Amino acid sequence: MKIYVSKINESWIVDRFRDEWIKNNSQINTPFAFKADVIWLIAPWVWRNISKKNLTNKKVVCTIHHLEDGDFENDKREEFFERDKYVDVYHVISKKTKNELEQYTKKPITYIPFWSNNKIFYEIKNKKKLRKELNISENAFVIGSFQRDTEGKDLKSPKLIKGPDRLLEIFEHYNKTKNELLIVLSGKRRQYITSELVKRNINYKYFEMVDFQKLNQLYNCLDLYIVASRIEGGPQAIVECAMTKTPLISTDVGIASEILSKKSIFDMQNFISAEPDIDTSFKNAVKYNIPNGFKEFIYLFENLI
């Protein structure tokens, strides 16, 4: 059995998943679509980069990360149904996306969360030393957010599906209730949040682009991580918080209900009462560690041939 995983090159988390798959499954991976038994469209929009001959002659697995309201309007609707002709099985990373996708296709849909990498994301015990290295006060209450929040078209407009407006509302609450609040940000396209934090006189540190070692350190220095999104496929931050034992609360998006305790999931009416549950999230995420996290994917591919 040989698997070809579609190329992305968008500096997106799925690029990392592709690299990890290839590195850890070299015996069944091939860099050539024509040599593959299964073509894995790990990002659905790259399907046009693969010849129709290969898409027709091979088994095709297509990953759908999440669905938005506009995904089935006009040209996007036509694009979906044209690609759907070549897909044998869809792969989704959350049950929510599975339920949504079932409305648009009769093809089989398999739910498998992406794997977690505990060589990258793990708990660091000495928080005091870590904060000193990061120049963060030991007394600060530190909240993290490492997801982009700005639209790419102008770097000013908030990407509302990521919930940056909601984050700001929660930040303002904690700014009133904590003596020394610090917001730690990372990732690209944070212009909306940073400009709003300045307006509201809320302290923050911005580590724009960091390597995995630094990102793991940032998770480990937090008192709380918040996912306030309206729509998500993952987000992978939920798994990364679980692996680093970072306290986390989240809206009920993507895989949140499959990883987190019910008491850690909030809406904007009850975020004040949401409580992190590190033990539950770690227990639910650790089973997807490499290499165990690959097993269900391999089983899916084997049963297609």
Image (spheres, helix red, strand yellow):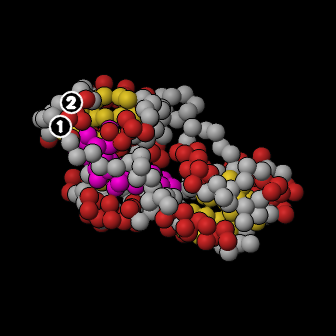
What is the number of the mark on residue 207? none
Numbered circle sitting on residue 132: 2
Please, what is the three-letter code of the amino acid marked with disc 2?
Lys
Q: Percent position (x, y) of residue 148?
A: 46, 38
The residue tagged 1 is: 128
Q: State which quarter of the image contains the N terminus.
A: bottom right
Residue at screen point 28% across, 35% down: 183
Specify whether 37 is left or right of 283: right
Q: Residue furthest right?
A: 53
Badge 2: few (under 14), some or many (20 or more) residues near its Cα, within 10 Å? few
How far across and down, in percent of the image, does residue 159 sit? 48, 40
Whether label 2 touches label 1, CB < 8 Å: yes
Outermost residue on the front side: it is 27
Mark 2: secondary structure: helix
Amino acid at pointer 1: Lys
Query: Is residue 226 part of the magenta span, yes or no?
Result: yes
Question: Which segment is the magenta one?
Answer: 218-246
Residue at 32%, 38% (x, y): give it: 218
Secondary structure of the residue carrying tag 1 is helix
Q: Is residue 169 above or below residue 266?
A: above
